[in-house]
Every structure is written in C-alpha cells, then in structure tokens.
Amino acid sequence: MPDSLTFAAFACIWLWLVARVVVRNARAGSVGLPAAWLFSVSFMYGGAFVYAFPGYDHIRADAHWYLATLEFTEATVLRGLMATMLGLFGFALGCGAFARRRVAPMSLPMSANPAFAQQLLWMIGGIAALGLMLHAARVSFPMSAAILQVTRNMAVGCVCLGAAIAVVRRRSLVRWSLLGGLLPAYFLLVWGFVSYGFVVLMLYAGFWLSVLRPQKMPCWKLAVGSATALYVMLVLFVAWMSFRAEIRGVIWQGGEWSERASVLWRALGGVEWVRPGNLAALDWINIRLNQTMMVGKVIEWHSDYPELRQHGATLWVVLLAWVPRALWPGKPEMGGSDFMAEHTGRLFSESSTFGVGPVIEFYVNFGYPGVFVGCVTLGFCLRWLDRRAALSLGRGDLFGFLKWFTVGIALVAPSSMMIFVAASAAMAFIAMSTLGTLLVRPRRVRVI
C-alpha cells in the first residue's frame, strides 16, 4: 500500500510543474489560459493528496458512506495519479515550459484614445448579457447551447479586457472585480451549479497572474497569497458540499431570492476548517475532487477488459465537431455518465453526470502513450491560442485578443470530452470571426 510520503512527493512535483508553466509562460507573454487549465485540473484531481495526511483512510469506521460505494483502494488512486502526472508533464511540454529560448515579455498597449475600447466593451458586454438572459429564460433554438456558451465565454473576455484597460489607465479594479464576480454568482444562484463558475474564477486567476499582477510583487507574497486563496476555496467547497442538497432544493424548486440567499448564508455559517484532524472535511474533498480515483478505476477495468480500448474512436470525431446537430442527428450530447459507466464498470444514477476529462479519454483510446501525446497536443494548442491572444493584446488589437481568448476558453474544460471542447472552440471561432467581419473594423487600437 502506498504511504503518505508517496502522495506528498507527488504533490511537490505537481506544484513545481504548475509553477513552472505559469512563470515561464507569463515571462514569454501569456493571458493565463494554460495557467487556468492547470488550476482547474489541480483542483479537480488534487483530492488524491488527502492521502498525504498521515492517518487518513477512506475505509475507516467513521468515513463517509459514499466512499465505500465507490469500491477503490489507495493503490487505485496512486495508479490514477501516476497517469495524471504523465499527462501533466505532457501538457507542460506542449506549453513550452521546458523550452530554452527567451522571448521578450508582453507589455500592455498604451495610447491616448480610449473611444474604440469603450465601444468594444459595451458591444461585447451587451451580447454576453443578452446570451445570459436567454440562458436564464431557458430559450432554446437550433445550436442554442453552443451559441449561449460562446456568449458566456465572451463575458469572461470582456471582464478581463476591461480589467487590463483599467490597469493601463492606473484605475481601480474594484468595478471589474465586482462585475467578474457576477458570473459565478449567476450560475450559483440561478442554476445551483458551481462548476462553470469555478472555471471562470480560474480564468480570472490565470489572467491576473499573467497580465495584471504587479511585476515587482515579491515571490513570497505571491506564494502566500496563492496558498491562502487555495485554502479558502477548499473551505468554501466543503461548506458547499455540506449544504449542496438543501441549496439546490431551494433553487430548483423556484425559491425566492431571499430563500436562496438565506440558505447560502446558512451554508457559510457551517464553514469548517480544513485540517489534517478534520477527517470529515477531507472525505468531502476525496468524494468530489478526486478525479484521479476515477482514472485509476478506468485503468484497472481496462486491465481486466482490454477489448474496451477505443483506438481513437472518440477522437477522430473531433474533426466533425463543427457539424451542427441538424445535419448530424446522432451527434454526441453532453451530460450523463454512460461513458464512465462503460469504462469503470460502475453503475451511476441516471440523474448524475460524471465528467470524463482528457486523461481518461486519452487513456481509453491509446493507453499511457495516448495520455502523454494527447496532453502534449492539448498543451500546444492551448498555448498557441494563448500566445495569439497575448500578442493581440500587446499590440492593441483588442478584438483580436477577445477572439483568441474566447476560443481558448473553450479548451479550459477539465471534465469535458474532446468533441465537446472542439465543438465549443469551433463555434467560438465562427461566431467571433463573423462578429469581427460585421461589426468591427480590422484596426489596431491603443487603450489609454
């Protein structure tokens, strides 16, 4: 059986890889897309590191009952962690984190005419707001899901661009911070979900570290701030899991805003400190944030049933991701857990959705080589989009930044299958290119 020191060693290597990618990309010019992907994956897969705390065991007498139903061991988690680390190294390699060449760092544009920047922010913000209202009203039309997802990503890009302009003009970020917080709050209060709102927060964090962070900030302050932010998120996550059923019950039954606020307030009142001795809190993290356990179960199930290997079947269809459902009636749909059930041997509730993620999908298709090569490719593609967005922002091509940033956000989906990632990216590219042709003159504009 693996011991706590084994998991602690993997945790140190994981943190080193994340820090290397973030620092190297920021120095070479980045808008934080690879950082956001790494932060999201780290949070979803990092539950494996609860086993780094001496004395923690998910099969103890007072452990949460749900952990026993998953039928896994620490060895299962370790197998999944090793495969995930292989993918993490591949992603870092694809992002150029080990490249030796030096690239001049990106600088934000500076000029004296802010008119076009303001017009662009109002236009993109208005389109994004319209998309969110249609989403809240549950309006459905052909390709509505993909289009509405693009408008949500446009909202993130609009907030990041507005914050960058505020920094260049030496103005406060309070307004943009409040606007940025509305999007995660929307998904929580209107729909009762935190997953997309969490990814939005990771995008903000990556953009701040790569673009907005004061260049003279000492490393120790950055490290302490990052550790504090991570701890606060874990505490809030445990509080959310403890009250999730009650919160969703109020929201999904159409409760008044006062009721929703009240139950959220009670959830905050039940906050518990996450510490080695609080095994119940560690159980919640292990239940929901331990995607490495599911990776391990896939590996074990495939060792018993090698005929389940897909040999690229779920990846070749990525080339057809741009085809609308009207022309492809059998196009795969998001949601459900059929794929995970087939490749783990578990039965899931029909009302539940267990995300697959790139590590599982690449392994299911080509095994360990697929995990490494697939993550190298994913890292390269995301870094290419990230670099295009950074170059556009640096030379004052504000719409170009929004275009490439919005396309790149589609790739920051740590629990989605590649066909859905590619479909979202293709729709974002088509929508932003069309919008640029119709509404935006192709020109470079400085923003101060």
Image (cartoon, rainbow, N blue to C red):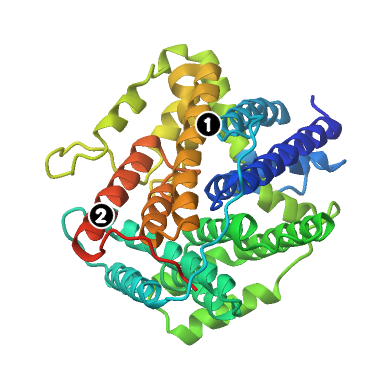
The amino acid sitting under disc 2 is: Ala
- The span from disc 1 to disc 2 (Cα, nearest Å) is 29 Å
| Left or right, residue 106 beside residue 403 | right
**Residue depicted at x 78% and y 44%:** 61
**Residue depicted at x 47% and y 29%:** 377
- Residue 30 x %, y %: 56, 49
The amino acid sitting under disc 1 is: Val
Q: Considering depth in this image, is 90 or 76 the residue closer to the camera?
A: 90
* Residue 431: image tag: 2
**Residue depicted at x 76% and y 61%:** 216
| Left or right, residue 357 beside residue 232 | left
How packed is label 1: few (under 14 Cα within 10 Å), some, or many (20 or more)?
many
Q: Would you say residue 24 is visible in this rendering? A: yes
- Residue 357 x %, y %: 48, 38
Query: Furthest residue to the left?
Result: 327
Q: Earlier in the sequence, mark 1 or mark 2?
A: 1
Q: Could you tell me which secondary element the residue under label 1 belongs to?
A: helix
Disc 1 to disc 2: CB gap under 8 Å: no
* Residue 192: image tag: none
Q: Considering depth in this image, is 40 or 300 the residue closer to the camera?
A: 40
Kindly identify which residue carries mark 1.
Answer: 359
How packed is label 2: few (under 14 Cα within 10 Å), some, or many (20 or more)?
some
Nearer the camera: disc 1 or disc 2: 2
The image quadrant that residue 91 belongs to is top right
Q: Could you tell me which secondary element the residue under label 2 belongs to?
A: helix
The image quadrant that residue 296 belongs to is top right
- Residue 437 x %, y %: 21, 57
**Residue depicted at x 48% and y 43%:** 415
